[in-house]
Amino acid sequence: MSRELMVAADDLQRKLSQLVAKLEALSRLRASQRNALLSTPQSDNWRGSKRDRFEGEFARQQAALGAMIDDARRFQLQVSQAAAQAALDASKEK
């Protein structure tokens, strides 16, 4: 595997790790904000059907974020495996 490809694969791995970390932080932040917003039981704005709709949409969005995190991790693993295989193939050719 050429030096340039190794550098590119390492850079992609690093950026994917950063993406996963940022998406996880966003998910935690949203959950924290939700908890802070809904922890006031006397708020009439967060009862009944309005709250049910909010909770449903929040759960859908959190699930979408989770799927994005899973996809980024899966892609990161594929890049790692491809880079390792390319390095192995290159060493066999020598």
Image (cartoon, grey):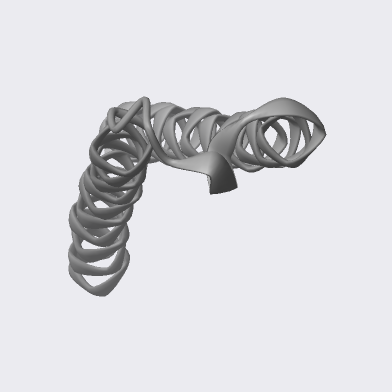
- Residue at coordinates 61% horizontally, 39% vertically from top-left? 58
| Residue 84: quarter of image | top left
| 9, above or below 53, in the image | below
| Residue 14: quarter of image | bottom left
| 11, above or below 36, in the image | below
- Camera-side residue: 40 or 77? 40
Quick check: 27 left or right of 72?
A: left
- Residue at coordinates 52% horizontally, 28% vertically from top-left? 70
Q: Position of residue 71 (x, y in %)?
A: 58, 36
| 61, above or below 18, in the image | above
- Residue at coordinates 26% horizontally, 61% vertically from top-left? 15
Q: Position of residue 75 (x, y in %)?
A: 52, 39
- Camera-side residue: 80 or 6? 80
- Residue at coordinates 32% horizontally, 55% vertically from top-left? 19
Quick check: 71 left or right of 33?
A: right
| 40, above or below 79, in the image | above
Image mark count: 0
- Quadrant including the C terminus: top left
- Camera-side residue: 9 or 31? 31
| Residue 55: quarter of image | top right
Task: Specify the farthest residue to the bottom.
Answer: 4
Q: Position of residue 25 (x, y in %)?
A: 22, 45
